[in-house]
Image (cartoon, rainbow, N blue to C red):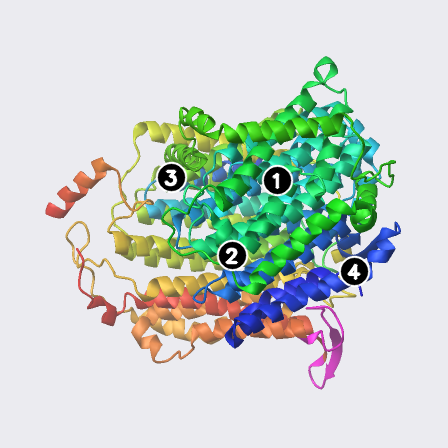
Amino acid sequence: MELIFALCVGILTACGVYLTLRGSTFTVVIGLTLLSYAVNLFLFASGRLALNAAPILKQAEQHTDPLPQALVLTAIVIGFAMTAFAVILAMRARADLGNDHVDGNPPELEQTLQHKDKRS
Amino acid sequence: MNLYWIPLLTFIGCFIPLATVKWGRSLCTAATALFPALALLIVLQNLGAVLHGEDIRFSQSWIPALGLDISFRLDGLSLLFALLILGIGLLVILYARYYLSEKEQMGRFYGYLMLFMTAMIGFVLSNNLLQMWFFWELTSISSFLLISYWHHRSDARKGARMALTITGAGGLALLAGIVLIGQLLGSYDLDVVLNSGDAIRDADNYLVILVLVLLGAFTKSAQFPFYFWLPHAMAAPTPVSAYLHSATMVKAGIFLMARMFPVLAGTESWFLIVSITGLLTLLIGAYMALFKHDLKGLLAYSTVSHLGLITLLLGIGTDLAAVAAVFHIINHATFKASLFMAAGIIDHETGSRDMRQLNGLWKYMPQTATLAMVAAAAMAGVPLLNGFLSKEMFFAETLDQSTLGSISWMIPVFATIGAAFSVAYSLRFIHDVFFNGEPVDLPKTPHEPPRYMRVPVEILVGLCLVVGIFPEQTVGHLLAAASTSVLGGYLPEYHLYIWHGLNLPFIMSIIAMAGGAVLYLNRQRLFRFQAHFPERNESQLFDTSVKKLRDFIRVFLAWFDNGSTQRSVFWLLFLALAFTLFPLMQLNTTAGHRPQIPVDTVMLAGATLLCVASIATVIWHHLRLLALLLLSVVGMIVSIAFALFSAPDLALTQLSVEVVTIVLLLLALYFLPQRIRNYSSPSRIVRDLSLSVLIGGVVGTITYALMTRPFDTISGFFTENAKTLGGGTNIVNVILVDFRGFDTFGEITVLGIAALGIYKLIARMRLFQLHADTNGLPWTEDKHPIMFQIISQALLPLALMVSVYIFLRGHNLPGGGFIAGLITSVAIIQQYIARGYVWLQDRIRINYLTLIGTGLSIAFLTGVGSFIWQQPFLKSWHDYVHIPLIGEIELASAMAFDLGVYLTVVGASMLILANLGGLTSSERLRVEDDQ
């Protein structure tokens, strides 16, 4: 199972990184979300995988490491705050700058396309 | 009185002039002078003990882990410098009272001056290298402020910048040297360092340490090739030049070399570097001084030359050379400070410093002229004055060395040449200014200065004479004590005679005198010769090199970071990859020996779904809604994975966050362009794909390698004490609200800040709102479906009850503030979706901002509450309470903290979503369409 878990984390990371490097803001937000899944899973994995070993006293024979879980729990919530901030920033940038490129000015080629769009 | 009072008093003195300046100039001067005077009294109180060879120390541990103590020492060397700094400082304060004009801000000037004095006195008294360095840097900064005191003048600003750049850069080198010493010895304590001379000299990196420390000393003491900042620092008011640039600050580098003399000196490299630098500085300074028409320029280059002389003496490194160096420090400080003050008086009373204009002043100011002439004679090394004595000792020491092998004879020859130039420029100072015809076009008619402006000069010139005639009786003890410290507790046999007989040094003196006279008589020819050389303007040179550096960095930055986010992110990820790839290659086997969990069909199906969904998200990321749905599939699988691998808390959190996130992103879709354009060129896609695949591979490998290796958890403490100390059985929750409560407190604060930031971003947003989608279809006008409304309304109390339940059981079973907060948010959001923003706005009158504030306050107060029981911040308390009918329940203060978490989470997530949703409401729809 560890191998499959690692494969999943790897694929999530790769997809997240690729989308994060794109030019349009919404895609970057999706990339960041994927990346934070990957990071959370990775952090969680540092406590090793265990079945039926929830870190709750009296409920199981043995307990898996609770510390990574505590870290990941807050990371999930902070990750939400970060995604929200990024997405609102994207909206604000779109509102103020008139486009959805991460730098606020899309490449030349695209600008001409945009003009065409407006005209049509 | 303790030693720390000395820098403390001068430090308090920084603020006195600012407070007293409104009471008039004389009173302000007196009040300011009081503090260094008191400090001087403390020094004098300890004078007897120190002169008898006792070292006085004060030490207070500050950050022991860094080797940083507050530590002072008063030994012979620091006593000498303390007397110079405080004594001359007092005279300069008196002098500046008359030098500064009515309209100048005296309070600011004295404030800076006292700050400098504090820095300097702290520096010489420091008994810890790091502390010493701190004061060293403070001298650079305060001298910057003093040089740029007339900040309306561009030369003052330039000079100040140059001085700060050069001495600041040297200071960094010195810090590096100090850190190397500290690493070598494991201590920054000067007592330890001074006793470890052999260890340092034998160290492999001795040369590195030496060069770094010397770089600091040479830049500060204006040694070749860094000397050029000092003449430009003459843009400062003359009291500053007298104080900083002759008597004290430029001697800081000398002090450093003298202080480190027992540790660093005595090697071939010390001799070569220090003495050759000193000799070069001595010659260049003496030569340049002769050609300066500016009075202060002449004195500045002469200072450079004399600093070179002292450096050369320290470089020669013999015991007697060190004594001569200390002696010359004293003498140079007295005659040069008085000369600067005299130059200031001349400038003040004539309005000019140009020696081509200044002539024949003897008639107008005979008393000042006499004083200046005596001081200049001391500078030239005329017998019966203090400069003569140390110069004789200097000559004797240049003869008494053989370190350059067969060409050692060159040093005394060059020393004599330097001395001849010194005589020549001293002659020029006397003859050109006070005789040599009549003044030319002076702005003012010269006259004697105010009575008390001359007093400091009289005292200093008096010292030159007294020391010159009765050396042993006046400075003998002080010189002996200071030399003993420089030599590390040993004092060689020497005698301070006025007349040593007709020996070689005396003959050298006579040659220098005669040579100087000849040089001066032929000065016109020399000036003409010098005129052939282009005027070297170091200021321009410095500016050009700074500009070149700036341009280079600009070009580099334009290439490296052109302002594109994509490019920055790419570099960041690329570097992260580069740094992880290399260590990974050294990992021989990927898989560890830890037993692995067998795979079953469900797990396999889940993993497949996750991989397919995430890859599909990438492929169809142009289709926004589909990408979002695929993303939610990934999130769902992740939460199932958490549930499967024994993390119920995480599963609950992930699940509820997932709902909130997807709702948020769905809302965002409305405001973002409907068509996602492809901004990337094919080559960029290939580049990014390869990078992301590599990074994914690395992260996957690390994850696999990590998970298959056994590990020692550090959570044993948490598992054992969750029940006994934290009073809960859900260890994750106990960690969050108790053991690591402070972290959680920080995290909810961040959450609150993020929500506030979003609130502000939304508040003034101009919106893109189209009346139709890209296909030209108008938006639907459907009302909220009634079935959904009814069901949502019925579900609300149920959902709230669940969240209360989840909150209450959180300490013992999966749940807690975070999860309960998210569930509450989801319940409220559902109402918003079902009923719309406007309908709900009248019914839910919760100010989410207040909610965040309340939550954070509750969490904070719970933490502070433990102070009442003398417990550390956030230490939790718990007990069991018996309530009739319900039975025994447990009450923990951690629960109050968790309530704070709960409120903050609800407040933050609702503040974000409700405000964002509010943008779509009818009132905002009326906003002018931008497109």
The image position of residue B659, as x and y in percent, is 44, 58
Mark 2 or 3, which is nearer the eye? 3
Instruction: Locate residue B268: give its quadrant.
Output: top right
User: Is B881 within the magenta?
Assistant: yes
Amino acid found under the numbered disc labelled 3: Gln
Q: The disc numbered 3 marks a residue on which chain?
A: B
Label 2 environment density (alpha carbons within 10 Å; few <14, some 14–19, many ≥20): some
Which residue corresponds to the image point at 52% horizontal and 74% vertical from the top-left?
Answer: B24
- Magenta extent: B865-887
Q: CA distance from mark 3 to mark 1?
A: 48 Å
**Residue B506 visible, this angle:** yes
Please tell me the numbered disc located at residue B221: 1
Q: Quadrant of the N terminus of chain B?
A: bottom right
Label 4 environment density (alpha carbons within 10 Å; few <14, some 14–19, many ≥20): some
Q: The disc numbered 1 marks a residue on which chain?
A: B
Mark 4 or 1, which is nearer the eye? 4
Please tell me the numbered disc located at residue A78: 2
In the rendered image, which residue does mark 3 sit on?
Answer: B566
Amino acid found under the numbered disc labelled 4: Leu
User: Is B583 within the magenta?
Assistant: no
From the viewer's side, name the closer residue of B31 and B712: B31
Q: CA distance from mark 3 to mark 4?
A: 66 Å
Q: Secondary structure at mark 1?
A: loop
